[in-house]
Amino acid sequence: MGNWIINHGLTSLILVVWMAINIFLFVWYYFIYDLNEEYYYTRHLLGSALSWARAPAAVLNFNCMLILLPVCRNLLSLFRGSFVCCGRTMRKQLDKNLSFHKLVAYTIALMTAVHLIAHLLNLEWYNNSRRGVYDTLSTALSDLEDTENTTYLNPMRRTDTDAQQSPTFLVFTSIAGITGVIITLALILIITSSMEFIRRSYFEVFWYTHHLFVVFFAGLVIHGAGFIVRKQLTTDPPHNYTLCKDRSAEWGRIPECPIPKFGGGPAQTWWWVIGPMILYVCERLLRFIRYMQKVQYRKIVMHPSKVLELQMVKDGFKMDVGQYIFLNCPAISELEWHPFTMTSAPEEDFFSVHIRSAGDWTDKLIDIMQKLPEGAQGPKMGVDGPFGTASEDVFDYEVSMLVGAGIGITPFASILKSIWYKFKISNPKLRTRKIYFYWLCRETHAFEWFADLLQVLEKEMEARGMGDFLTYKLYLTGWDQSHITHVVVHHDEDTDVVTGLKQKTHYGRPEWDKEFEQVRKENPTSVVGTFLCGPAVLAKVLEKKCAKYSDVDPRKTKFYFNKENF
């Protein structure tokens, strides 16, 4: 239990508070519409479907207020800088921004479904009441006209249409109905295109449909102005429903029972979402300003395994280790922005990214770069960022475990380069005294572009008598028989046949229990930061190991798990 609290305590507390607010809003608004006297006549027409429609609407407003905040990356970077004094645990929550974004989105989808079903029932009750299917009071309430002296309760105003078509007619001729349809369709497209398979295989579909959020929010703000759900207004003399509900035939004829008046509103959704919408607009304006700033290519390199390296220069650009940027290439698409972790170090006078062929956009970019004449500048490139990630905190730990899978090595390239520069100038501020580095790859060519950096680090550590500072292990998870034969033949050589490094390549996957046990044994009183840039499956494994091998005793080893999310 103590290990779990170390890695998940604050996250769980935040989720409990968020869930408590959702439950409170649902229950509070449910009872407002279920018990308040001003909704007595409305409840008579609609029954409990009234409360089941309005309570989810309140939860929707709250979560629509939150949904944009986790993707305001400049705001998160500002907070990350502000939380430096608050400790790594608080900053760590900011790295879960996309997970929280998804959780809020699921809640919006669920509450939309409940809200929609309840209103479909409401339309049926309205229609039946308008046509006199129910009791005398329901008919009297539905017959109230919208004139100078009276106001209506039942929005189903027409009776000259087919009984089965009336609800449909109301949906497509009212503000609330039309915007409700638009909002629902936009939400369905956004959610379905956000599935993992779509994001990985058809990123462009995900990107473009996700921008339907503009339509969603526009419809959301207007939706409440339809005033489909109405309440009783105060009149002089007052209409007392307890006295008059059974005397509808005498409404307006006796002073004790004047004709009741009804009204809707005010629309409340915009109160909730206006702030986040303004913040998001500012976010996009800042992206546009950065897009207009000139970016020059310093070097374009094509590595094995279709990995493209871009070294770029931009005035005023400053970065930290492990940060990422968004790139936009108008020659491919003027609207698409794609995230890439930087592989350069802050000490260098340029910034670089390594881009693997992983979809239409990256394939087109690689194709464009390969066709360039030698020494030529590439196409115009828009750069937004840099933005902070979990890897920024790597030097806050005495001991760090860095785990990369495939191209997920990129943030650690930046870290290892920065370490090399820090050793070169004997930086006294470097508090990290040990780094364990693990890289998992499916094919041998993937090691080639990064092996040079490891060779330089290997020699630098030996020259300074710090050979134990960096322990690295490379794992090849895919191979064929010819490769095995080649390895066996050269087994006795001093350097590895795959990478040229002194550390030999391992075959298969790491035995994580063995690795964590070794790290704990070698660092019995340290705080160990475990950093991953890789698949979710591996993240679950490492997260469990961090909890398993952390000791509750503050004097002993503790593992903190951190994962790249962008």
Image (tube, rainbow, N blue to C red):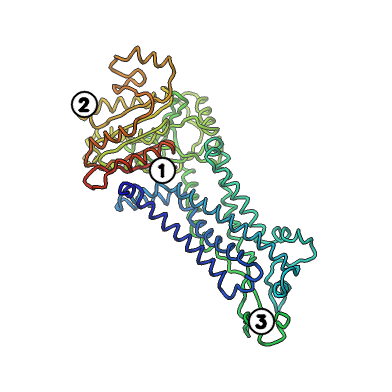
Q: Quadrant of residue 144?
A: bottom right
Q: Secondary structure at mark 2?
A: helix
Q: From where the camera sits, is residue 319 visible?
A: no
* CA–CA distance in space, label 2 to label 1: 34 Å
Nearest-to-viewer mark from 2 and 1: 2
Q: Earlier in the sequence, mark 2 or mark 3?
A: 3
Mark 2 = which residue? 463
Nearest-to-viewer mark from 1 and 3: 3
Q: Is residue 245 left or right of residue 504?
A: right
- Label 2: few (<14), some (14–19) or many (≥20) C-alpha neighbours in 10 Å: few
Mark 1 = which residue? 386
Quarter of the figure with the C terminus: top left
Whole-percent x, y for residue 10 in the image: 35, 52
Whole-percent x, y for residue 93 in the image: 38, 50
* x 60%, y 72%: residue: 39
Q: Secondary structure at mark 3?
A: helix
Q: Are marks 2 and 3 in contact (CB under 8 Å)?
A: no
* x 64%, y 53%: residue: 182
